[in-house]
Amino acid sequence: MDDQHEPLMDHENQGNFIGFLEFEEDIEPIRSFGDFSREFYIESKKLWCLAAPAVFTSIAQYSLGSITQSFVGHVGTLELAAVSVEGSVIAGLSFGLLV
């Protein structure tokens, strides 16, 4: 068979790509509340695997900022500038790691 008539996808692996080498077929039609609950759990688990790093980064940044602000009132002008630069560097680094 020449290249122009060769199929682009293998019909045996038409599922959705969910991992490095793992395929998953489409879900069956939902016919009961139990089916809905099962699929809701599976999809929520996948969503949290994707969203957990972003949630952790947001909480860590907020915590770092609030703890830093609580101690900044006890330092001088030069130290206050250093804390401000440090906060910007940490925020940029964490966003870089998130991406």
Image (tube, rainbow, N blue to C red):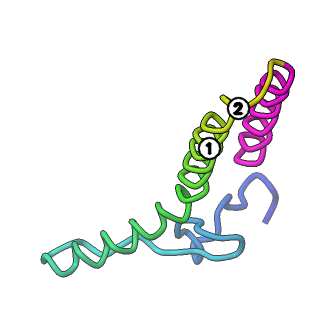
Q: Is residue 12 above or below residue 71?
A: below
Q: Secondary structure at mark 2?
A: loop
Instruction: Assess disc 2: are there few (<14), some (14-19) or many (≥20) residues with their C-alpha within 10 Å of its C-alpha.
Output: few
What is the span of residues highlighted in magenta in the rendered image? 78-99
Q: Position of residue 13 (x, y in %)?
A: 59, 74
Most common SS among magenta residues: helix
Say whether residue 65 is left or right of residue 95: left
The quadrant of the image that shows the C terminus is: top right
The answer to which of marks 2 and 1 sits earlier in the sequence is 1
* Direction top: furthest residue: 77
Q: Is residue 43 above or below residue 37?
A: above
Which residue in the protein does label 2 denote?
74
Which residue in the protein does label 1 denote?
67
Say whether residue 43 is left or right of residue 60: left
Q: Which one is in front, 57 or 31? A: 57
Q: How much space separates mark 2 and mark 1, taking CA atoms?
A: 13 Å
Residue type at the position of mark 2 = His
Q: Which one is in front, 74 or 64? A: 74
Q: Position of residue 71 (x, y in %)?
A: 67, 38
Q: Position of residue 7 (x, y in %)?
A: 67, 61
Q: Residue at x 58, y 39 (%)?
A: 66
Q: Is residue 8 above or below residue 88?
A: below
Residue type at the position of mark 1 = Ile
